[in-house]
Amino acid sequence: MATTDEQIERVRELVASVPAGQVVTYGDIAAAAGLSSARTVGWIMRTDSADLPWHRVVPASGRPAAHIARRQLARLELEGVPISGDRVDLSRARHRFPHGSREHGDEPRADDE
């Protein structure tokens, strides 16, 4: 099934709403947007996020992708996001959307990348 313009705009709205100093996972965005896969969020972020705070979206591991890790972690550190080694401390930095995302403490889904 193709990703709709409405789904793309919803993902963009959610990413734009993440406050400085906090992060979300691809799976958090997918759940809040009503998408079935975090991979869809990854595709949207790769193709349409230049004007968004893309650095506030991380994999469920908290470890950014190797090709952007240094730049992403540096930006997050400037915002005061707690970082331990090469990963974001999700237990302290994770933003919670008011509706549609998992509650604190729930285990990430297998596709929560």
Image (spheres, rainbow, N blue to C red):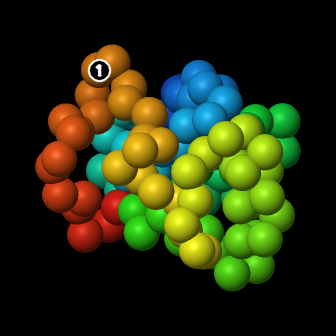
Assign a secondary structure to mark 1: loop
Residue at figure coordinates x 67%, y 41% from the top left = 80
Residue at figure coordinates x 38%, y 26% from the top left = 97
Q: Residue furthest top?
A: 98
| Horizontal side, residue 10 vs residue 100: left or right | right
| Horizontal side, residue 101 vs residue 39: left or right | left
Residue where numbered disc 1 is placed: 99
Q: Relative to 12, say whether 108 is above or below.
A: below
Task: Pick the quarter of the image with the C terminus.
Answer: bottom left
Seen from the viewer's position, the closer of residues 107 and 85 is 85
Graded by Cα atoms within 10 Å as few (under 14), some (14 to 19) or many (20 or more), the crowding at tag 1 reads few
Q: Relative to 9, say whether 88 is above or below.
A: below
Q: Relative to 35, say whether 16 is above or below.
A: above
Residue at figure coordinates x 61%, y 26% from the top left = 19
- Tell me, yes or no, if residue 15 can be seen here: no
**How many marks overall?**
1
Residue at figure coordinates x 66%, y 30% from the top left = 20
Q: Position of residue 27 (x, y in %)?
A: 38, 52
Q: Position of residue 100 (x, y in %)?
A: 27, 28
Please identify the quarter of the rendering in which residue 63 is found: bottom right
Query: Looking at numbered disc 1 in the image, what kind of residue is underneath it?
Result: His
Q: Position of residue 1 (x, y in %)?
A: 41, 53
Q: Residue furthest bottom?
A: 66
Seen from the viewer's position, the closer of residues 103 and 33 is 103
Q: Position of residue 90 (x, y in %)?
A: 42, 52
| Horizontal side, residue 6 vs residue 79: left or right | left
